[in-house]
Image (cartoon, rainbow, N blue to C red):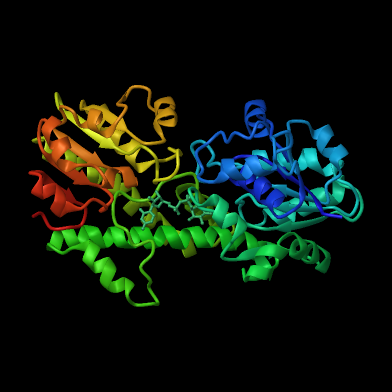
Amino acid sequence: MALKITVIGTGYLGATHAAAMAELGFEVLGLDVVPEKVAALAAGRVPMYEPGLEELLGRHVAGIGGSSGRLRFTTSWDELEHFGGDVHFVCVNTPQKHGEYACDMAYVDAAFASLAPRVKGGALVVGKSTVPVGSAGRLAGLLAEHAPEGVDLAWNPEFLREGFAVRDTLHPDRIVVGVDGDRAEKLLREVYAAPIAEGSPFVVTDFPTAELVKTSANSFLATKISFINAMAEVCEAAGGDVVKLAEAIGHDERIGRKFLRAGIGFGGGCLPKDIRAFMARAGELGADQALTFLREVDSINMRRRGHMVELAREAVGGSFLGTRVAVLGATFKPDSDDVRDSPALNVAGQIHLQGGQVTVYDPKGMDNARLLFPTLRYADSALEAVRGADVVLHLTEWREFRELDPAALGRVASHRVVLDGRNALDGAEWREAGWTYRAMGRPRA
Ligand code: UDX
């Protein structure tokens, strides 16, 4: 009999994980406390933009014509208890606490508290949320106290990237499981049999190591981005070109070319909050010195946003008052509708607060951006955003923006000045169309 799997929390991570588990052949029940989210998923609709996820849901959600029927969603803990899952994945989010660096464990704690008395004896609970090191040990204690005999815990961090969530979940570049016994490992090998057979490395660790793998991986990625952005600052001071520099150092296999795109820096729901929570946790453990460099990584990153604002101010003659600024991009990266801690929206907001008339256009992030920043203006297309603009800021590297016709935009802009905050546009093409093109960490032409 195929394993029965539950997924608690159906955001980016949980919705994708639930659909992927159904795709792998398991019987799956997803639970979330937000009824609208559950209603959408149960109808096969994805409440956020994630390429490929809707198709995957359509293939498995019960009640959809032609689906396998292996995937259902509920808000009811009683239904989850009745379902009698063999493996329960906890995928709720761990946001940054208000006014603090530490991460908020309230959703994880609530999920475990509801789950513990409802799991059947012998089941496995698997944490996937990103948590401060030490949490798994504490939660194992909670299960021992409130769950029936023989319920095990494992920690199985996720590494999915928004925009590639389906691929990253079905074909992970590694599977990391923190366990404290053979039984949990055996069950997880069964769950992940397909990707393991495909060659995904399966790394077995203890609890703290598994928790640390996730936060250290994100810290490394953040450090790599801030490193190249620091080089961009030096390049600007010295007249160098950070794009060429990244290409050249990237040829060294030990360094690699990925995650060396200089620009306005990283954002999103993971990298910024994860490095902060990691610093906070290290402080609690008395190891804060080990991570003081992350403070620098964070400040280099935040400086990029301010630097972009300054470049824009310079481009409009020293003051934003009475000027029109077009912002292309609102999401924290392309192929996502996520605007959480988005550098693009942050820059747009700063300019707006300083008196500029900012008009934003994004291919997928408009609804979320409007909710977060209702006072900005929004246009229905790049062309409309650029109409009458004194300066154009390219802040999220959507393909749509690379395919824009600079000549057509030039005919509607007030001034042909474009600032490329992602080093992704073809500068030569824009210059040919009469634009002053400026990018971050590159010489002025
Ligand atoms: C990240 C991790 O990559 C993933 O493994 C983890 O599970 C969750 O956090 P995600 O937040 O989806 O994933 O975004 P990612 O693709 O890592 O990009 C993060 C930010 O860094 C984006 O704002 C992006 O624009 C920026 N970035 C990325 C750069 O500025 N330069 C780069 O070279 C790469």
* Above or below: residue 10 compared with residue 293: above
Looking at the rendering, in which quadrant would you find the C terminus? bottom left
* Above or below: residue 289 compared with residue 438: below
Asked whether, in this view, residue 299 is left or right of residue 40, the answer is left
Along the line of sight, the residue nearer the viewer: 36 or 115: 36
Residue 370 is drawn in which quadrant? Answer: top left
Along the line of sight, the residue nearer the viewer: 156 or 383: 383
Asked whether, in this view, residue 122 is left or right of residue 207, the answer is right
Which residue is rendered at x = 28% and y = 50% of the image?
422
Which residue is rendered at x = 59% and y = 61% of the image?
171
Asked whether, in this view, residue 77 is left or right of residue 297, the answer is right
Residue 392: x and y in percent read 19, 38
Residue 365: x and y in percent read 41, 34
Residue 97: x and y in percent read 54, 39
* Above or below: residue 4 compared with residue 356: below
Looking at the rendering, in which quadrant would you find the N terminus? bottom right
Residue at the extreme front of the image, as rendered: 66
* Above or below: residue 384 compared with residue 133: above
Would you say residue 427 is visible in this rendering?
yes
Would you say residue 203 is visible in this rendering?
no
Q: How many marks?
A: 0
Along the line of sight, the residue nearer the viewer: 355 or 408: 408
Residue 100: x and y in percent read 50, 41
